[in-house]
Image: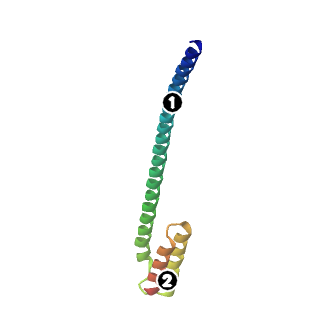
């Protein structure tokens, strides 16, 4: 009888320990999942903010380019001589060096000046 009682007690203790261990594991997994969700949300917020800032920078560059195009047109003399074209090309090169114009935009504007 004593041996059976000892085996039964061991089984109850082992079962209780297993149940407690499983409960702790589930709780911990839930906490980790919520932390991962919070981190993912923060990363998404940072990505959204970076995309917004890039969009704003692009719009500023576009506005600067449009302002340049509006200013460059009246500066050209009516004769359209080589000096005027060189001055426009120099201005374009300055804008490209400042980062206002991309390589493609620079090439497009340069072709327009040389063709005109």
Disc number for residue 81: none
> Which quarter of the figure is the C terminus placed in?
bottom left
Between 83 and 36, the one lying in front of the other is 36
Percent x, y for residue 84? 49, 82
Residue at the spot of label 2: 85
- The residue that appears at 52% across and 70% down in the rendered structure is 95
The image's colour scheme reads rainbow
Counting the numbered discs, the total is 2
> Which quarter of the figure is the N terminus placed in?
top right
**Residue at the front extreme?**
1
Describe residue 75's horizontal placement relative to residue 17 as left or right: left
Tell me the SS state at disc 1.
Answer: helix
* Mark 1 Cα-neighbour bin, 10 Å: few <14, some 14–19, many ≥20: few
* Mark 2 Cα-neighbour bin, 10 Å: few <14, some 14–19, many ≥20: some
Vertical arrangement, residue 92 with respect to residue 116, above or below: above
Vertical arrangement, residue 66 with respect to residue 43, above or below: below
- The residue that appears at 46% across and 41% down in the rendered structure is 37
Q: Earlier in the sequence, mark 1 or mark 2?
A: 1
Between 93 and 105, the one lying in front of the other is 105
Vertical arrangement, residue 67 with respect to residue 75, above or below: above
Percent x, y for residue 3? 59, 15
Percent x, y for residue 13? 55, 20
Residue at the spot of label 1: 22
Between 92 and 57, the one lying in front of the other is 57
**Callout 1–callout 2 Cβ contact below 8 Å:** no
Tell me the SS state at disc 2.
Answer: helix
**Label 1 – label 2 distance at C-alpha:** 79 Å
- The residue that appears at 49% across and 78% down in the rendered structure is 107
Q: Mark 1 or mark 2: which is in front?
A: 1
Which image quadrant is residue 75 in? bottom left
- The residue that appears at 40% across and 71% down in the rendered structure is 70
């Amino acid at each position: 009888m004593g041996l059976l009682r000892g085996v039964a007690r061991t089984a109850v203790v082992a079962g209780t320990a297993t149940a407690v261990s499983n409960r702790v594991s589930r709780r911990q997994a839930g906490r980790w999942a919520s932390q991962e969700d919070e981190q993912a949300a923060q990363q998404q917020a940072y990505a959204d903010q970076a995309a917004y800032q890039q969009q704003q920078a692009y719009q500023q560059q576009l506005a600067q380019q449009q302002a340049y195009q509006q200013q460059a047109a009246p500066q050209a003399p009516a004769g359209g001589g080589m000096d005027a074209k060189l001055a426009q090309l120099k201005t374009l090169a300055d804008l490209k060096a400042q980062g206002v114009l991309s390589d493609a935009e620079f090439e497009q504007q340069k072709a327009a000046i040389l063709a005109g």
